[in-house]
Every structure is written in structure tokens, then in C-alpha cells.
Image (tube, grey):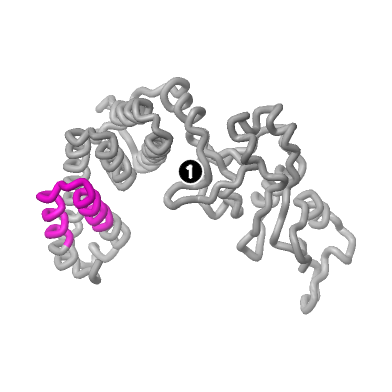
Amino acid sequence: MIKGYTEIGQAIDFLADDSPKTKTVPNYQGKIDFIPNNQFSIPVDSAKVLANGTVPAKFADRIVPEVLWTLDRRYLIKNHVIVFDLLATNNWERPIYFAVTVSSDNYLNLEDYFQVHGLAYRIVPINTKSDYPYVGGIDTEKVYNNLINKFKWGGITDPGIYIDENIERMLYNIRSSFSRLSDELIQEGKLDSARVVMEKCEEVLPNERVPYNIFNLPLVENYFRLGENEKALEMMNKLKNNAYNELDYVVSLEPKFANLLDYEKRLNLHIINELGNIAQTYGVNDLQQEFETKLQEYILALKMPLY
């Protein structure tokens, strides 16, 4: 293994080289394609990325001289190699995006250089440590413009349109984007913009068509942070009812079927627990007590370990 970081172009050149010295490793008899490092770098021309809009001027002081990252796996499959080749040859000429729906397994440990632009992450030469559940950084101005002004919404609120589970998952990703944007705007002190974002989310993704779920937890808290207690309580009550209904259904099943829904059980118990924490934080004592009681009741009914 090579010590230090290998420039990504050199890594791809090594992989593409067909000479015997690049296809043999100790204790292995046959030929094998490999890269002798798991730490990589991409050089950054700060003037270029500012001039072509890869990085807005407002983030100029955060540009890194090179993108550095470590791959935490021992293999690459073909689609990963294609991404590496794009990174090696693109030279910051064109944007490279990952859809928010892509499995994190395909991020190749580049998350800290992601910047969300709506429903996609763009690779930028800015290091932002991911803060679970969010990935990378966010350009709130760009995301706001996309979600509020550019994207065309419609159809979901029509009860005659069927929403299958795949579409529903996509809609939850969209709700998560609204949620993250509102959270970041509040942190930036842009409270009026945060309200607009949250109202838009309610307008295009109502509970009646896209049931409130875990992605509504930040929205509930954000309404409290904005002093919109009535809206916070309305969303909290709808979200709790959804969680109760899910768990009541699981409780009604025979054990052999209920045992197949471990993820759903834990997810909804988590929602109730987090709602209790939010209620406690913002002094909604009656609901906080209700959540605590219901949580224990469901844990007993589902024969779950202590939460």
C-alpha cells in the first residue's frame, strides 16, 4: 500500500495499466485489478471553481486546496470505478451530482464534500462534516429557489391519483429536503423564509396524502422554534396518531407476522419517544406524559426490550 494520499487521476491510470506489475499482489497467483491505496485526493483550482460557479462567492473562504478522503471498503464495482473516472477527468469543468435517493453505499465516502441543491448532492471543494441525519452541507439560497420557485408541484393532492410505495418513498425524500432547509434557515436567522418553506411543504405534501412520518419530527420542532405553537401541536397530534395506528396494527397481528415488522415497530417507537422529548423541551406537559405512558404500553404489548 502507498502511504499518504494518491491523486485520483494517478489511481485510475494505475487501474487502467495492463502491465504485469500493476496486476499482481503478494500471496495471490492470478492477475487482479487493484489500486494500491484507499486514500485519494482531487486538486482544486480555487479561481476556476469560483469563476465557473462550482462554488458561489459567498463560500470562497471555505474552498479547500484539495479534496481528501479515505475509502472504507476493500473493493470497487464497475459503477464505482466510473465515478472515480469522472472525478479524475472532470477537472471541475461540469457539476457531478448524486441523487438523494442513491444508497449511501454508493457515496464512496465523499459525503463531507456534498452540498445539497434540492433533490441532489453536488460534489464541491468545501469540507462540511455530515451531521446525522443530514449529509454534507447546504446552499440554502439555491435550495430555497429550487423548492419554492423552480420546481413545479402538482398532482399529489389529487385523491384520484394512486401513490404506490416507491413514489411514497420519493415523497418522503422531498419532505426531508423541506425539513432540512427550514432547519438551516432558522439557524441562519431567516425566520420568514423558514415559514414559507414549511407552509409550502404542508401544501404540496399534506398528511392526508403523504402520511406524516419521522421526517416531520424536525418540522414539529421548527414550528415550536418559530413560536408557531398551534401549528406545532397540530402536526404533533397528526404524527402521533399515525404512529399509534401503525403500532396498533402490529399489536393486532399474530406474533409470527408481527415479528416480521421489527423495523416498523422500532421506527414508530422512536417517533413517540422523540415526540415526548420535543413536548418536554417546549413545556407541553400533558402530551409529554401521554407519550411516556403510550411508549411503555407499546413496549409491553410488543414484548420489546426496554427502549
Looking at the image, residue 24 sits to the left or right of residue 107; the answer is: right
Q: Residues within 10 Å of mark 1 (few under 14, many from 20)?
A: few
Q: Tell me the magenta residue range.
A: 269-295
Report x, y in % for residue 89.
77, 41
Residue placed at 30% from the left, 39% from the top? 222
- Is residue 239 shown above or below 31? above
Left or right: 297, with 207 as reference point: left
Query: For the image shown, how many numbered marks are present on the structure?
Result: 1
At horizontal 19% and vertical 41% (from top left) the residue drawn is 238
**Vertical position of residue 154 compared to residue 140: above or below:** above
* Secondary structure mostly taken by the magenta-highlighted segment of the chain: helix
Q: Which residue is mark 1?
A: 101
- Residue at 19% over, 65% down: 299
Depth order, front residue of 303/178: 178
Along the line of sight, the residue nearer the viewer: 31 or 94 = 94
Q: Is residue 300 left or right of residue 180?
A: left
Q: Amino acid at mark 1?
A: Thr
Q: Is residue 294 magenta?
A: yes
